[in-house]
Amino acid sequence: MMISAQQAGDRLGISKRRVLQLIKLKRLKATKVGNQYTIHEEDLKHILKRNESRVLTYVEVMEKLNDLHGMSDIVKKHLVCSMVGHSKLVVADRKAYYCARCGTAMFDVLLDAEKVAHLVQIRDGKLTASNLQGCKWQDTLMVDFELD
């Protein structure tokens, strides 16, 4: 099925202008009909696969969050986790380790130590500065904690 540049942009989550740039750069196949471009839906799969593997920058994540006016913090936190992955900062109980940002259960406590060695546990809402040394902005964004 053929779709317009606007429809392609809507499906890719980018602007029509960006779609036209991708066409001009020959990264997206398109056919010009009059003064409009049409794109085969199948050709979007290549762009979608490439976008899925690309890591978002801090600025891109913040721009997306700034566009979410009126959404609750918990919804925003889940969206951050979907964009950059769950935080290395975790809260634990006897059953599991939970992402300190969104609260999703990540690991069963009974897993081997190697899988949880990279995690930093938050106790009573507090961390030490030394615990944060291996963490990146992706781990601390929208995570509520205090430094000891």
Image (cartoon, rainbow, N blue to C red):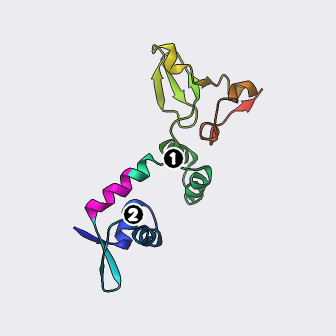
- Callout 2 amino acid: Arg
Instruction: Return the residue found at the far left.
Output: 1
In depth, the one of 138 and 37 nearer the eye is 37
User: In the picture provided, is 42 more to the left or to the right than 90?
Assistant: left
- Callout 1 amino acid: Val
Secondary structure found at label 1: loop
Q: Quadrant of residue 9?
A: bottom left
Image x and y of residue 42, in percent: 26, 60
Q: Is residue 84 above or below residue 133?
A: below
Query: Looking at the image, can residue 19 be seen?
Result: yes
State the separation of the CA atoms marked 2 and 1.
19 Å
- The quarter of the rendered structure image containing the N terminus is bottom left
Circles 2 and 1, Cβ within 8 Å, touching? The answer is no
48 in magenta: yes
Q: Residues within 10 Å of mark 1 (few under 14, many from 20)?
A: few
Query: In the rendering, which numbered label is found on residue 27?
Result: 2
Going 39% across and 63% down the picture, which residue do you hit?
Answer: 27
In depth, the one of 59 and 126 nearer the eye is 59
Going 50% across and 43% down the picture, which residue do you hit?
Answer: 78
* Viewer-nearest of discs 2 and 1: 2
User: In the picture provided, is 44 more to the left or to the right than 14?
Assistant: left
Q: Which residue is mark 1?
A: 55
In depth, the one of 42 and 110 nearer the eye is 42
User: In the picture provided, is 144 more to the left or to the right than 65?
Assistant: right
Q: Residues within 10 Å of mark 2 (few under 14, many from 20)?
A: few
Image x and y of residue 22, in percent: 42, 67
Secondary structure found at label 2: loop
Residues drawn in magenta: 41-49
